[in-house]
Image (cartoon, rainbow, N blue to C red):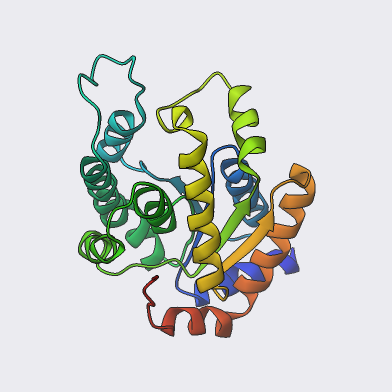
Amino acid sequence: MKHTKTHIKKSRALRGAFITFEGTEGSGKSTQCRRLAQTLQGQGYHVLETREPGGTPLAEAIRGLFLATSKANIHKEAITPACESMLIFAARAQHVAHVIQPALEKGMVVLCDRFFDSTLAYQGYARGLEKTFLYEAQQFATNGLQPHFTFFLDLPIQDGLARRRQSNKQDRLDQESLRFHQRVRRGFLALAKHDPMRIHTVDARQSPQTLASHIASVAEQLLQDSRSLHLLRSSKKKSVE
């Protein structure tokens, strides 16, 4: 019980921590996000688990448009990369304003399944949209909100797609070409190399339990060290070439 009270005090003192999970299709990030939420809640942290695109009723409706396959009646034409990015930013603007920012202001630990790194990897590196534009749109949609820390679950593309094929939930991105997914992974790897203080790369080929234990250990240390979070908050945003 004493251990739990200590964690509650620390989480409140931080005035909110924003941790994101990133990865290619089938990397297991959603599972690990959920497991970390359960672990931190058990330790007394006030945790909000959410996802992108989504997180609010309107943003979830946009998610349905964004991920619907070509078989869906709503898609009479292909979604252009520009439209795709605008859907993402529209959903994110709602998500940040109505869910993420209020939770952070309450001192909660916010765990989010995908955020801006996914936008850079999918719409920037894979779709070829100008990264300067994506950074400017992100600034406009979120008022400059950035994660304090990010777990990138790295997995060979063939392994991830094989996992997804075993699922009954195939979305539009699952149906993209192998080359597309390879560009996405290269994008994530470039982002992780560029910002190693924030982005912690994890080998997603490990067992789910091994992954969960490692992620929990890293997250707990981060949350206990308010100085580390302060440094992450104070770091200047860097652009990616």
Q: Is residue 43 visible?
A: no
Horizontal arrangement in the rendering, residue 146 relative to residue 26 (left or right): left
In the image, residue 161 lies at what x, y percent?
A: 59, 32
> Residue at image x 24%, y 67%?
143
Looking at this view, name the residue that lies furthest to the front.
Answer: 179
Q: Is residue 84 visible?
A: yes
Frontmost residue, 237 versus 224:
237
> Residue at image x 79%, y 50%?
210
Q: Quadrant of residue 222?
A: bottom right
> Residue at image x 23%, y 19%?
74
Q: Is residue 26 above or below residue 183?
A: above
Q: Is residue 9 above or below residue 117?
A: below
Horizontal arrangement in the rendering, residue 49 relative to residue 45 (left or right): left
In the image, residue 231 lies at what x, y percent?
A: 50, 84
Q: Quadrant of residue 159?
A: top right
Frontmost residue, 237 versus 13:
237
In the image, residue 100 lies at what x, y percent?
A: 37, 57
Horizontal arrangement in the rendering, residue 11 relative to residue 83 (left or right): right
Q: Is residue 28 above or below residue 199?
A: above
> Residue at image x 31%, y 56%?
96
* Quadrant housing the N terminus: bottom right
* Quadrant housing the C terminus: bottom left
In the image, residue 200 lies at what x, y percent?
A: 61, 65
